[in-house]
Amino acid sequence: MHKLFRTGAAMLLALTLLAGVGGCKSVSAEQPPAAAIDQDAGASVSDADIVHAYHYLLGRLLILRQQRLDFEKDGFQWNRVVYRRPGGVQWANPNLDVVYAEAWVALDEKTCVLADIPRIEGRYYTWQMLDGWGETVLNINERTFAQRPYGRYALCLKGAHATPPAGALRIDLPVRTLRMLTRIELGDDPAQAQRLQREFRLTPLGEPKLEAPIEVPLFTNAQLPHVEAFAFAAQILDGQPDLAPRMDEVRAQVRAVAALVQSGAPGRARVDSVIEREALPALARRMKALGPAGNGWIRPSTVGQYGSNYLDRTVVDLAGIWANNPDEVMYYAMLHLDGSATYTQTYPKDALPQSLARYFWSVTEVDSTQYRVVPNPLGRFLLNRQSRVQPNADGSVTLAFGPARPDGVPATNWLPTQRGTTYNLTFRLYGPTTEVAAGQYFPPPFVRQP
């Protein structure tokens, strides 16, 4: 069994954004004998090459880890929808104000899959699809498909020789396997949201041919694989294509580093050392500088679709997997807050949270080590529109975060925290206003109370 779990620099990742999953099982990968590898493989591989290659490869490993968890632990089957109960997902920092339906979708040259979306009005929803690197390739909703926001769609591999049924709108997709998530706002009537959730359906039009899965080990976010990651490099590079632009150089670096790892013990040790000493600390630093900062909040500058920025893509795959595009939602993060302290945050009356979003807002609390919701006696893990937060006399709104509700703050405005812990907050604005979407807004600062 590979030794996959490390301490040291990897523990810096406990300061990151949002949510993690654990695991225990590992699978070895075949390697060619060392004698068959160029013993001078490391001569042209710099430490920077190792760092870049690791950051690139890790993003795909994180998606593959989640795929394996979905099938082995949650009973997923290809082209079959899993309907989650509210709050019932275990991946990175899920929204607690929506209900999810999820699936892994498989296509081939002859096989399309029908997607059925119910008519939904007055409630946020989207049908999102992502590729195997965490890139959003499709959203279906009334904003992106204004002429056809609901009904039947035929999801097909681009170039597939398939004729969808009459009445189904064909949508060509660029890869054979994708992750689907539907988000439906729970709103004031969660029962209705769950009824609508069940009307999102997939129907395969045949049996697509599937490649054998890459069964990566089930590592944890706080204990990431080191040199062992490169055991899967060839399978990953030769598998699902990376649609992002300008990736040839880093993919060549991955192949060169994989050759160095296979060249023998010295090369393997060198790669392992560089990952521990440089790649993991650089990843942790990037997590805390993922975009512009204001008032103590970080707004990721690239999310959902990343262009050639594979480092940010990997950070989001690690800390907030399945993130969507800024057109759908704006994310802000406040990191490593003291659960024993009490903080307040005041929104002026002319910039209340709901005024910043066409659909809804929320602020969610997770711990900063395992990235799960923080237990508390109220069972309250977020504040949002349904919290019915109460305004101050001047029309402003003050929210409070702390182990005990501070004097003068209504119970509806308080999110409990746990003493002796640290936690992160994610502020979401679904359907951001023009100012927010333009990146000109940050939530108000936190004030630590005496």
Image (cartoon, rainbow, N blue to C red):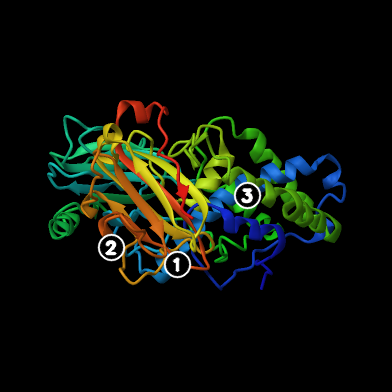
Q: Amino acid at mark 1?
A: Gln
Q: CA distance from mark 2 to mark 3?
A: 31 Å
Label 3 sits on residue? 284
- In the image, which is nearer the foreground, mark 3 or mark 1? 1
Residue shown at 13%/39% (left/top)? 166
Q: Which residue is mark 2?
A: 84
In the picture, measured across the screen, residue 52 lies left or right of residue 206, that is: right
Q: Quadrant of the N terminus?
A: bottom right
Which of disc 1 and disc 3 is earlier in sequence?
A: 3
Q: Please state which of the two labelled residues, at mark 2 or mark 1, is closer to the viewer.
A: 1
Inter-mark Cα distance, 3 to 1 = 24 Å
Front residue of 234/378: it is 378
Dot placed on the residue nearer the N-terminal end, 2 or 1: 2
Looking at the rendered structure, the kind of residue marked 3 is Ala
Q: Is residue 89 left or right of residue 197?
A: right
Residue 386, relative to residue 373: is it above or below? above
Sequence order check, earlier mark of 2 and 3: 2
Does residue 207 appear in the picture of this structure? no
In-image side of 41 versus 13 (left or right)? right
| Secondary structure of the residue carrying numbered label 2 | loop
Disc 3 residue crowd, few under 14, some 14–19, many 20+, Cα 10 Å:
many
Whole-percent x and y of residue 110?
A: 32, 46
Disc 2, disc 1: CB below 8 Å? no
Q: Which disc, if any, is residue 418? A: 1
Q: Which x, y percent locates residue 6?
A: 68, 65
